[in-house]
Amino acid sequence: DAGITQSPRHKVTETGTPVTLRCHQTENHRYMYWYRQDPGHGLRLIHYSYGVKDTDKGEVSDGYSVSRSKTEDFLLTLESATSSQTSVYFCAISGYQSTNTGELFFGEGSRLTVL
Amino acid sequence: QKEVEQDPGPLSVPEGAIVSLNCTYSNSAFQYFMWYRQYSRKGPELLMYTYSSGNKEDGRFTAQVDKSSKYISLFIRDSQPSDSATYLCAMKVDSSYKLIFGSGTRLLVRP
């Protein structure tokens, strides 16, 4: 298994509170991604990173921010959580070969419930 | 309209059946086509990838791409209960690291 660890794995929070999800990798891969998965929508890209301090928005980035200060860590922050952000969040990583294979390695997911 | 459409299922088949899973897409710039398998409460994992049109076979799995119809398929022969999972198609344009996923089809193979 690819060395990807997400934390926390489960979190229940209240509307308006800040939340940070952490993704840690031991593969030294350049690219890191945050996806959310919701019924009927599949996986949707929130933000991605192509290097330390280099990030860009995905298709559903509103209400989320990210930071990558080290190769191995990619943080996803919800500044003020809303009920619409209740979801399962997946971190993924990939190396240069993924341009030819489309292979992403996913973490186990973080289940977030916003009450 | 979503860029990638996939029937959510669930699809229920008896063990040993041939399974056909499909996706349609609207962006003609997609060049790479992938199938991911996701077991319950796990992250997706790559099953197969195909570049451009044609077929690719790997054991009991065959991936087909028809770019003229903007249609891709995954066939599973001699399906097993262990194949029960959600199957997501994914696509990307050349030289991109960003994948666009379908919503996934849930497959149940009955013993």
Image: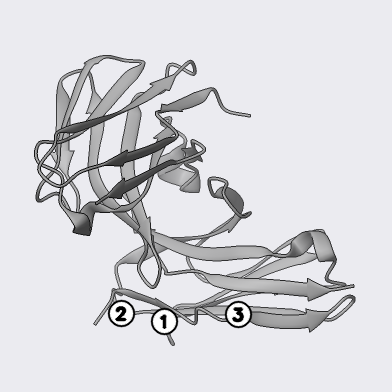
What subunit carries mark 1?
Answer: B
Percent position of residue B78, x then y: 87, 72
Residues at discs 1 and 2 in contact (Cβ within 8 Å): yes
What subunit carries mark 3?
Answer: B
> What residue appears at the point 83 percent right and 71 percent down from the top-left corner?
B79
Of B27 and A42, which appears nearest the observer?
A42
- Which SS class for mark 1? loop
Q: Is residue B14 left or right of residue A99?
A: right
Q: Residues within 10 Å of mark 3 (few under 14, many from 20)?
A: few
Residue B71 higher or lower than A72, as above or below: below
> What residue appears at the point 50 percent right and 44 percent down from the top-left corner?
A103
* Number of numbered tags placed on the structure image: 3
Q: Quadrant of residue A34?
A: top left
Q: Which residue is mark 2?
A: B26
What subunit carries mark 2?
Answer: B
- Which SS class for mark 2? loop
Q: Is residue A106 left or right of residue A7?
A: right
Front disc: 2 or 3: 3
Q: Which residue is mark 3?
A: B10
Q: Give the colour scheme shown.
A: one colour
Q: Which residue is mark 1?
A: B70
Front disc: 3 or 1: 3
Q: Is residue A58 visible?
A: yes
Residues at discs 2 and 3 in contact (Cβ within 8 Å): no
Of B11 and B49, which appears nearest the observer?
B11
